[in-house]
Amino acid sequence: MEPVLDLAGIGFGPSNLALAIAVEEHALPVRARFFERQARFGWHRGMLLEDATMQVSFLKDLVTLRNPTSTFSFLCYLRDRGRLIDFVNHKNLFPLRKEFHDYFEWAAERVAHHVSYGAAVSRVRADGDGFEVEVGEESVRARNLVLATGLEANLPEGIEAGERIWHNKDLLTKVEGLKDPRHVVVVGAGQSAAEAVAFFHDRFPEVEVHGVFARYGYSPADDSPFANRIFDPAAVDDFYAAPEDVKRKLMGYHANTNYGVVDQDLIEELYRRVYREKVVGRQRLLLHNTSRLTEVNSDGKCVIESLADGGQLPVDADVIVYATGYRPANPVGLLGEVADACERDERGRLKVTRDYRVVTTKDVRGGIYLQGGTEHTHGITSSLLSNTAVRVGEILESILRRPVVGAESVSALQAVK
């Protein structure tokens, strides 16, 4: 019978990839397996646009803030790919998104022995001091679970994705089937929306691109040094200890560091394009501010309505792209009856300890840890790359400090004493 695991990870995006690396780098063996329903590693593949860059520094990679000497760093990846000197000469903190995805794949390949791909978890139940996890025909036992089930695409109420209605997460997957479009509508005011507008405007020289958003214009992201402290590991301590009203204020004050904002360079580029087209007298980039999309049909017919004066512009779109963000997946949605033992606060949110462990009733003795779904307790970095390296170190340390039964984990426990 397979020995009891110290941890079973459900989902294998960047967060649990970083945890697998922390396991790999630990001083003594830690028994861990990760289960990913995708056939291979993938992270927002539908938005890996040719010139799209990361919004975080390369130093906030999978390991550096936890272990600056790690061989899994982005710099070690560059050395392995033969681009280290070229990147240094580039004088840029923000790599291409495609390059960072390749870095993730490079790292994932190195810890592939910890991962089962094409493995969807079908059932979880409490079992003594841990859990039994069913994955297809296989059943494994683990003392702790680490859930990293990611985000779900958010579409407005009443809107369903289809042949002509997409969420931006599927942009590159579906665009190959789009032949000579005449009209494209992009809904949203954030980074992904602005990137989608620029992408269609570049890719199809004859297309008329309509950007639709309720704001007066795209708003720049606040990436100033002091505001960026909200992403610091120490800010997690501050946020966790703060009263509820202070938490709400902090999220409100600093929402413009991450939500519904666009890089300044892209804003200026889109403005240049609009102005240039006005000068040459052929305008095909049309940005509809203080507007919304109504009367949306599955065949692409829709109406752009002005919120200011109620004016309406019918559009027969070849495709409508909703760049309307994501919402957290139910972090304990896979746990079945075990989820009923997870305690919640007065607003129905999961209670989570500082070490990212869900508070459970006494009949669940194993640990359930979250990577994501903790914004209400740990702040804005809950599902962001900024704090991933530090977070996984804290989770692993917590797992190895928890009481264990049996000899299998004694050596790992001793390693952190």
Image: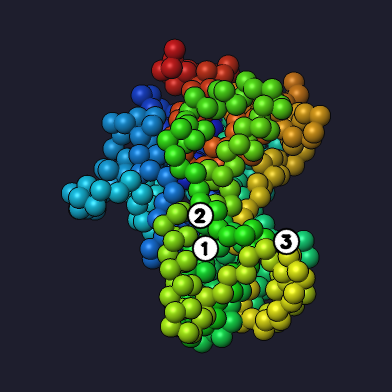
Mark positioned earlier in the residue sequence (3 or 2): 3
> Disc 2, disc 1: CB below 8 Å?
yes
Residue with the most extreme front position: 279
Q: Amino acid at mark 2?
A: Val
Q: Amino acid at mark 1?
A: Ala
At numbered mark 3, what does the secondary structure look like: helix, strand or loop?
loop
Q: Is residue 30 left or right of residue 290?
A: left
Q: Nearer the viewer, mark 3 or mark 2?
A: 2
> Disc 3, disc 2: CB below 8 Å?
no
Q: Nearer the viewer, mark 3 or mark 1?
A: 1
Q: Position of residue 56 (x, y in %)?
A: 42, 45
- Which residue, given by chain and number where applicable, does mark 3 sit on? 156
- Which residue, given by chain and number where applicable, does mark 1 sit on? 194
Q: Give me the residue at 38% from left, 65% from top.
A: 50
Q: Position of residue 146 (x, y in %)?
A: 57, 36
- Which residue, given by chain and number where applicable, does mark 2 sit on? 262
At numbered mark 1, what does the secondary structure look like: helix, strand or loop?
helix
Mark positioned earlier in the residue sequence (3 or 1): 3
Crowdedness near tag 3: few (<14), some (14–19) or many (≥20) residues, C-alpha within 10 Å: few
Q: Position of residue 405 (x, y in %)?
A: 58, 18
In this view, the residue in front, 291 or 136, is 291
- Inspect this view and state whether residue 219 appears: yes
Q: Amino acid at mark 3?
A: Pro
The answer to whether 280 is drawn above or below residue 188 in the figure is below
The CA span between labels 3 and 2 is: 21 Å
Q: Position of residue 1 (x, y in %)?
A: 54, 35
Q: Give me the residue at 38% from left, 24% from top.
A: 28
In this view, the residue in front, 95 or 352, is 95
- Inspect this view and state whether residue 31 appears: no
Q: Is residue 218 left or right of residue 351?
A: left
